[in-house]
């Protein structure tokens, strides 16, 4: 069959641009959602900060209340001690007066017989001591009443203090929870910010990788490579009959999700280093070099605008412009182009657009 090289179709280019726009919009959507979550977390942190300020004010007020209660309890304690001392003094005075009154009554009869004292004066003296004793007893009862009132006041203040201490404990616990939540939210913000930066980096890298690959494909001159006419069987006749370029197991499928809201435009294999990578069909090597994002890359042109791409190789065994037959060893599998694990990345394209390799290879 005659294969005539064709120029790039502007419609195809525009379609690719539209596809890239959709992919970039997907990353932008993830970025918007991530930044919105950061905004919500920061709003919660601000709310918690205001709550902590209010709690600290309440704690300060409770501490002032506790200081005031301690001061009042101290004053009551001083007053209690003073009244207790006065009560002891009054009780001692009563003991002395009762003893004197007893002695006066015991000796009154003898003094009267011996005429040592005037009877009227003696009677007045006894009445005086008796009334004085009663007055002191009344003072004792008054002191006891005062002490009882002071004890009640002490107990009431102690209960209030206990309540304020419990309130203080509750406030401090609430403050501790809020601070802990703030720490967690701050860590979440840090992680989300890192995610946003990663998405932005992925977006920039993918844009750069695609731009490099599309620029490369647009510059390929198949006329110069194939000449005006070459007789080979059409690539399209081998749909579903081609062999995979490697015997390794598939790691990712065509059109499956990848980071940044994008999808795989080819398939990736789980290779070991230096596994052979073979041509799926006869063609010319139109690129055999290192490319950003793809590492050591081989691109074959199979005619009729069909191309196959073999990326992340460890070593290349073909050169640009070389003609290769089906099954020719093109490269050794590797992890070039920033990959952490070895594995061939493989695409088939038609008119610059990726197509599902599983429909062609078995």
Image (tube, rainbow, N blue to C red):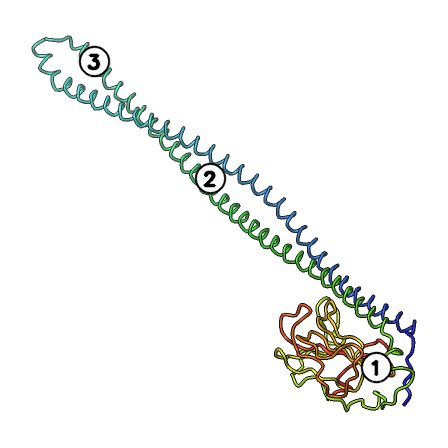
Crowding at label 3, few (<14), some or many (≥20) Cα neighbours within 10 Å? few
Q: Earlier in the sequence, mark 1 or mark 3?
A: 3
**C-alpha span from label 3 to label 2:** 52 Å
| Displayed quadrant of residue 103 | top left
Badge 3 vs badge 2, beta-carbon distance below 8 Å? no
Left or right: where 55 falls relative to 36 = left
Q: How many numbered circles are shown?
A: 3
The structure residue drawn at horizontal position 86% and vertical position 68%, both measured from the top left corner, is 17
How far from the left and from the top, in percent, is residue 281? 78, 87
| Displayed quadrant of residue 3 | bottom right
To which residue does mark 2 refer? Answer: 160
The structure residue drawn at horizontal position 87% and vertical position 75%, both measured from the top left corner, is 221
Tell me the quarter of the image containing the N terminus.
bottom right
Closer to us: mark 1 or mark 2? 1
Vertical arrangement, residue 332 with respect to residue 84, above or below:
below
| Displayed quadrant of residue 9 | bottom right
Q: Earlier in the sequence, mark 1 or mark 2?
A: 2
Closer to us: mark 3 or mark 2? 2
The structure residue drawn at horizontal position 60% and vertical position 55%, both measured from the top left corner, is 187
Front-most of residues 161 and 316: 316
| Residue 348 in sight here | no
**C-alpha span from label 1 to label 2:** 88 Å
Vertical arrangement, residue 42 with respect to residue 146, above or below:
below
To which residue does mark 3 refer? Answer: 125
Which element carries disc 2, helix, strand or loop?
helix
| Residue 192 in sight here | yes
How far from the left and from the top, in percent, is residue 278? 71, 84
């Amino acid at each position: 069959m005659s294969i005539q090289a064709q120029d790039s179709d502007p419609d195809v280019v525009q379609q690719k641009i539209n596809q890239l726009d959709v992919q970039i919009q997907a990353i932008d959507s993830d970025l918007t959602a991530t930044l919105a979550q950061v905004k919500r977390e920061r709003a919660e942190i601000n709310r918690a900060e205001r709550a902590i300020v209010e709690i600290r004010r309440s704690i300060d007020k409770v501490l002032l209340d506790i200081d005031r209660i301690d001061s009042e309890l101290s004053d009551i304690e001083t007053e209690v001690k003073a009244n207790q001392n006065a009560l002891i003094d009054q009780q001692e005075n009563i003991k002395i007066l009762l003893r004197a009154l007893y002695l006066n009554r015991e000796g009154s009869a003898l003094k009267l017989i011996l005429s040592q004292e005037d009877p009227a004066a003696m009677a007045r003296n006894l009445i005086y001591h008796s009334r004085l004793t009663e007055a002191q007893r009344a003072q004792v009862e008054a002191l006891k009443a005062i002490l009882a009132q002071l004890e009640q006041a002490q107990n009431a203040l102690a209960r209030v203090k206990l309540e304020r201490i419990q309130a203080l404990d509750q406030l401090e616990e609430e403050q501790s929870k809020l601070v802990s939540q703030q720490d967690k939210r701050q860590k979440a913000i840090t992680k989300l910010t890192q995610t946003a930066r990663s998405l932005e980096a992925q977006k920039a890298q993918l844009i750069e990788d695609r731009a490099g690959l599309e620029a490369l494909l647009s510059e390929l001159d198949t006329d110069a490579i194939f000449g005006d006419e070459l007789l080979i069987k059409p690539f399209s006749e081998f749909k579903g009959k081609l062999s995979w370029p490697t015997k390794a197991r598939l790691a990712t499928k065509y059109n499956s999700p990848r980071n940044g809201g994008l999808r795989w435009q080819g398939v990736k294999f789980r290779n070991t280093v230096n596994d052979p990578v073979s041509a799926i069909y006869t063609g010319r090597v139109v690129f055999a070099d290192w490319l950003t994002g793809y590492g050591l890359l081989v691109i074959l042109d199979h005619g009729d605008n069909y191309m196959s791409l073999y990326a992340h190789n460890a070593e290349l065994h073909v050169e640009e412009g070389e003609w290769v037959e089906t099954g020719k060893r093109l490269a050794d599998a590797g992890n070039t182009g920033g990959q952490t694990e070895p594995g061939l990345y493989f695409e088939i394209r038609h008119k610059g657009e990726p197509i599902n390799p599983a429909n062609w290879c078995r």
